[in-house]
Image (spheres, grey):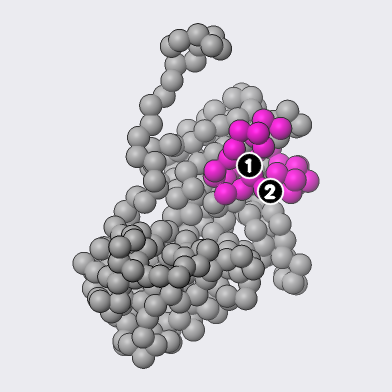
Amino acid sequence: MPRLHEVLTALDALWPPDRAESWDAVGTVCGEPDAEVNRVLFAVDPVQEIVDEAVRLGAGLLVTHHPLYLRGTTTVAATHFKGRVVHDLIKNDIALHVAHTNADTADPGVSDALAGALDLRVVGPLVPDPTDGKGRRGLGRICELPHPMPLREFAAYAAKRLPATAPGIRAAGDPDKVISTIAVSGGSGDSLFGYVREAGVDAFLTADLRHHPVSEAVQHTSLALLDAAHWATEWPWCEQAAAQLDEISDRHGWGLRVHVSKTVTDPWTAHAATTPTTAGAPN
């Protein structure tokens, strides 16, 4: 059975902390370096439901994509939900480790997992890492569809392939536009529109798209846009990451039991579709 520091060394090799953005908060939040680890749980969000799941599993390590304290804190008092998370982790001897933007740009990274969930063929990174001589690391991925299909059909296809969430998939652009090439980026991606236009793809699938950037993007070009739930675009990484750790465990003879949380932690819990009608008129 490995010690925590051994497992963390392996994770840092997969997603080096120095490749995280300067504003990010990655790495180990809590955990005793010499503690033995026999179970690991991967999840997107370090929220109470996930901590409770880790406790039930008897996990010694919880690995999440999103940081617990992205903007820092002056207290871990249990009167706040983040403080309660820290208390519960420590009381149950569970370490917490975060791989965020360092996992986004890895090879393979978050967008590779998203592309895999959609059965897309990855051509290369959307925003290449200039330090990567092989040209495989970077933010987002440029991909090809299994076969061309109209935007409306691809939106339905993506909704079936990605984990189910209340928001589902929204699409902007001509519903009948045929899509052959697409850029994908797990998580919030409307800051990448410039790179997407330069890539010359037919569509862009990401999350957290806002009204004004989307309106400007579809007015500026014929680019089709697909907006999925943030959690849904990043959850496939958990399965990819778990498989990577499984392989390392087998190679070292650690015997780790690696789990992926199926708990949906997307904050949106309901969706009521409206009926299209004349602008300003009641439905």
Taking 273 as reference, is 76 above or below it? below
Taking 72 as reference, is 110 above or below it? above
Callout 1 amino acid: Phe
Distance from label 1 to label 2 (Cα)?
Answer: 10 Å
Return the residue at label 2. 192
Quarter of the rendering containing residue 57: bottom left
Return the residue at label 1. 204
Residue at position x 72%, y 71% from top? Answer: 132
Which one is in front in this view, the residue at disc 1 or the one at disc 2?
2
Looking at the rendered structure, the secondary structure element under dot 1 is strand
Callout 2 amino acid: Leu
Disc 1 + disc 2, Cβ < 8 Å: yes
Label 2 Cα crowd, 10 Å radius (few <14 / some 14-19 / many 20+): some
Looking at the rendered structure, the secondary structure element under dot 2 is helix
The part of the chain drawn in magenta is 188-216
Left or right of residue 259: residue 243: right
Question: Residue 65 lies in magenta, yes or no?
Answer: no
Residue at position x 40%, y 47% from top? Answer: 266
Which of 275/224 is in front?
A: 275
Instruction: Residue 153: tell me if it is visible.
Output: yes
Instruction: Residue 246: tell me if it is visible.
Output: no
Q: What quarter of the picture does the C terminus occupy?
A: top left
Please tell me which of labels 1 and 2 falls first in the chain.
Answer: 2
Question: Residue 214 lies in magenta, yes or no?
Answer: yes
Q: What quarter of the picture does the N terminus occupy?
A: bottom left
